[in-house]
Amino acid sequence: MSLNAEQIMLVQSSFAKVKPISDQAAALFYARLFEIAPQVKPMFKGDMVEQGRKLMAMLNTVVNGLNNLQAIVPAAQNLARGHVGYGVRSEHYAYVGSALLYALEQGLGKDFTPAVKQAWSDAYGLLSGVMIAAAEQVESRSAA
């Protein structure tokens, strides 16, 4: 489980460009998520601006922690376990990844190069895999 130094640099440098527009990026993310996966919208009952800020704060933590994945994996696993209670299922992670890439593409414009897209895809794939595995453990315990 790892990303190479170039991938980490691409994710971190591109996220630094998104930070100044974090509220707009979060709004783009959720609009796209609800467009491609309307079935998840009922899971979001609170203030969506605040939800967007939480999303961006979590992304900031993850992006800054990419140099030490072992340190952020437990937090990602705990987050996934908690999301099971909201009704999040394994298949929802693909929608989230798609919405994330869309929001990044819209927010970064020409700076969303193929290499940046691949780095984000790899980083999301790595972390979502960890999260799905943690969530599936909770689901299998619940079913037993």
Image (cartoon, grey):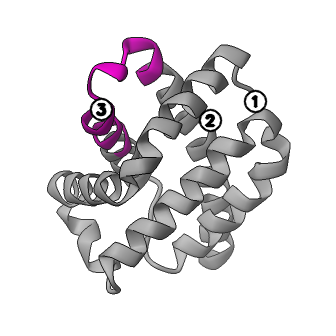
Q: For residue 126, which numbered disc appears in the image?
A: 2
Task: Say which of 43 and 84 sits in front.
Answer: 43
Q: Nearer the viewer, residue 65 or 13?
A: 13
Q: Amino acid at mark 2?
A: Leu
* Foreground tag (2 vs 3): 3
Q: Earlier in the sequence, mark 3 or mark 1?
A: 1
- Residue 97 in percent (x, y) is at 40, 43
The C terminus lies in quadrant = bottom right
Q: SS for tag 1?
A: loop
**Is residue 107 covered in magenta?**
yes
Magenta part of the chain: 100-117
- The image shows residue 73, relative to residue 86, as above or below, that is above
Q: Label 3, on which residue?
A: 105
The residue at the point 61 percent across, 75 percent down is 82
Q: Classify 47 as above or below 139.
A: below
Residues at discs 2 and 1 in contact (Cβ within 8 Å): yes
Q: For marks 2 and 1, give the CA distance.
A: 7 Å
- Image spot of residue 99 (x, y percent): 31, 46
Q: Check residue 29 for magenta coloring.
A: no
Q: Is residue 69 above or below residue 89?
A: above
Q: Is residue 86 left or right of residue 77?
A: left
